């Protein structure tokens, strides 16, 4: 497939690629057939060396995605085959950055192909994996399409825009037997793994509570004034699954986070990282040791006024009966004198703080009893994804485990938007079926995600926010 010199418009795209078959009927009914074995099949016995199998990847979204571009370039045996962005400026800037990296490298870096439409990457049967760093509203639909196209997926947090999309994307990974890694990178950081292991071993006794914080100094969003679409931006494709609106200022490329049609507020933007650690730590070695019973999110527009839809300040409480989690967000006041950790765990014999890429544990008198720090960043998590494709490692942030944490964000936002404390309904659990431990695509833990609809979708108000009421024509996800 040749690289277009400029982004194709929709009609040209449909005329020149087999993906026209999709868009002509529905973006959610792909017709790809796998005509080559993926990298995973060559290493199923786990005996090949780290660089034995080339893995070809494409990156969708070149804001946050540029970090993943750097990871792909830095990982032995990985070929960055494609980069994609709906904004020509970002696409050109990304290619220039890669070319500059090539000039500095001792080994030659082959420049990737470029496209404004990620579906061209899916149409390339030589590509093994898609890295999705597009906005939240694109993450689940793109993941579902990529799995159907036979691609493994690395998808940034939160991974889904609403509870139903969270369920669908896990179903897609299972149906098509794809490795799907979520971008909660701390799952791969060695000292954080050690901290969680110590919690599960009882370093501070029985665990009772976790507190999470996110503070920032964000400025007002600015008016959503009608404006001309910037040159080089394919706003039609940027919107993708979202029902169409006219272009406005202060939306693309970041402020969409604070508007419910597009984003998940600060809870889904940054709260997901801390909540994932809290749920992981409190859950014990066997995963969730108790079911979530209630969720309540209170807060408001205390600093910025109603320049955005999601709250700029608030606290969200998750009650599990025997333990709880509190996330507190302050998007517009950094609260620097507080010097708070990222996550603090409390047990009957002390506490443990997650700070940066390390941790510190204390007894009940505040004396330090353990600490460590280690590697952080994106690369180690990306490498784990690649090694899972090769068959050498399990995923550290498999999509079902990631979406269990994201579901906390969805439930919290529904609580805030409806003004209700959400209470789980009593649901009779079906008999658990033993997982096939030889199958890397089966999550062996007891899944609360598959029962989420029965547990939580209990009122018309909740139901109205459980899934997007309307998708743009041709973009509704189907598994």
Image (tube, grey):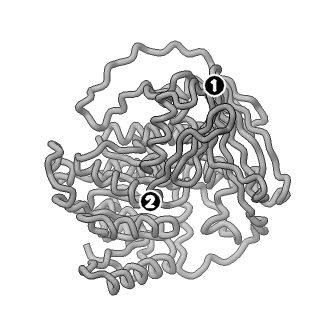
Q: How far from the left and from the top, in percent, is residue 160?
A: 52, 47
SS of the residue under disc 2: loop
Compared to 118, does 300 lie above or below? Answer: above
**In which quadrant of the rendered view does residue 277 lie?**
top right
Q: Nearer the viewer, residue 220 or 273?
A: 273
Q: Nearer the viewer, residue 292 or 455?
A: 292
| Callout count | 2
Compared to 114, does 192 lie above or below? Answer: above
Compared to 341, does 75 lie above or below? Answer: below
Q: How far from the left and from the top, in percent, is residue 396?
A: 39, 44
Whether the residues at callouts 1 and 2 have beta carbons within 8 Å, the answer is no
Lateral position of residue 185 relative to residue 244, left or right: left
Q: Is residue 109 visible?
A: yes
Cα distance, mark 1 to mark 2? 34 Å
- Sequence-wise, the earlier of marks 1 and 2 is 1
Q: How far from the left and from the top, in percent, is residue 449?
A: 49, 31
Give the labeled residue for mark 2. 378
Q: How far from the left and from the top, in percent, is residue 67?
A: 46, 67
| Label 2 packing within 10 angstroms: few (<14), some (14-19), many (20+) | some
Q: Which residue corresponds to the image point at 76% horizontal and 50% vertical from the top-left?
A: 311
Q: Nearer the viewer, residue 104 or 475?
A: 104
SS of the residue under disc 1: loop
| Label 1 packing within 10 angstroms: few (<14), some (14-19), many (20+) | some
Lateral position of residue 448 relative to residue 259, left or right: left
Q: Which residue corresponds to the image point at 45% horizontal and 46% vertical from the top-left?
A: 187
**In which quadrant of the rendered view does residue 14 lie?**
bottom left
Q: Which residue corresponds to the image point at 20% horizontal and 53% vertical from the top-left?
A: 38
Q: Nearer the viewer, mark 1 or mark 2?
A: 1
Q: Nearer the viewer, residue 416 or 98?
A: 98
Lateral position of residue 179 relative to residue 196, left or right: left
Compared to 368, does 219 lie above or below? Answer: below
Give the labeled residue for mark 1. 348
């Amino acid at each position: 497939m040749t690289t277009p010199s400029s982004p194709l418009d929709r009609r040209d795209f449909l005329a020149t690629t087999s993906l026209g078959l999709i868009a002509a009927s529905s973006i959610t009914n792909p017709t790809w057939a796998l005509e080559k074995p993926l990298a995973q099949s060559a290493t199923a016995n786990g005996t090949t060396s780290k660089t034995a199998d080339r893995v070809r990847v494409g990156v969708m979204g070149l804001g946050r995605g540029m970090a993943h571009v750097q990871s792909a370039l830095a990982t032995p045996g990985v070929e960055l085959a494609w980069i994609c962005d709906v904004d020509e400026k970002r696409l050109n800037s990304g290619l220039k950055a890669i070319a500059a990296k090539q000039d500095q490298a001792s080994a030659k870096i082959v420049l990737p192909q470029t496209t404004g439409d990620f579906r061209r990457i899916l149409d390339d049967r030589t590509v093994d994996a898609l890295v999705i760093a597009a906005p939240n509203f694109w993450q689940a639909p793109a993941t579902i399409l990529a799995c159907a196209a036979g691609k493994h997926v690395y998808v940034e947090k939160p991974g889904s825009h609403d509870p139903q999309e969270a369920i669908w994307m896990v179903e897609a990974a299972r149906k098509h037997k794809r490795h799907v890694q979520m971008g909660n990178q701390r799952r791969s950081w060695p000292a954080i793994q050690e901290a969680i292991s110590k919690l599960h071993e009882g370093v501070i006794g029985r665990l009772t509570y976790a507190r999470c914080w996110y503070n920032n100094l964000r400025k007002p969003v600015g008016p959503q004034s009608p404006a001309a679409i910037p040159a080089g931006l394919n706003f039609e494709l940027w919107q993708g699954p979202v029902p169409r609106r006219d272009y406005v200022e202060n939306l693309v490329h970041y402020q969409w986070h604070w508007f419910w049609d597009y984003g998940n507020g600060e809870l889904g933007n940054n709260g997901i990282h801390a909540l994932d650690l809290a749920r992981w730590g409190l859950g014990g070695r066997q995963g969730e040791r108790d079911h979530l019973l209630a969720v309540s999110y209170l807060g408001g527009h205390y600093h910025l006024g109603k320049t955005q839809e999601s709250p700029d300040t608030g606290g969200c409480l998750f009650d599990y009966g025997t333990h709880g989690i509190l996330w507190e967000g302050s998007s517009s006041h950094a609260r620097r004198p507080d010097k708070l950790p990222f996550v603090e765990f409390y047990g009957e014999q002390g506490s443990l703080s997650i700070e940066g890429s390390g941790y510190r544990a204390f007894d009940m008198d505040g004396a330090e009893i353990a600490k460590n720090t280690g590697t952080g960043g994106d690369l180690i998590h990306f490498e784990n994804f690649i090694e899972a494709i090769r068959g050498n490692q399990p995923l550290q942030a498999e999509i079902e485990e990631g979406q269990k944490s994201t579901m906390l964000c969805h439930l919290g936002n529904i609580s805030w938007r409806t003004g209700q404390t959400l209470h789980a309904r009593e649901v009779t659990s079906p008999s658990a079926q033993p997982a096939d431990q030889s199958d890397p695509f089966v999550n062996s833990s007891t899944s609360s995600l598959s029962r989420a609809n029965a547990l939580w979708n209990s009122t018309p108000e909740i139901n109205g926010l459980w899934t997007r009421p309307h998708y743009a024509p041709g973009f509704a996800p189907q598994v």
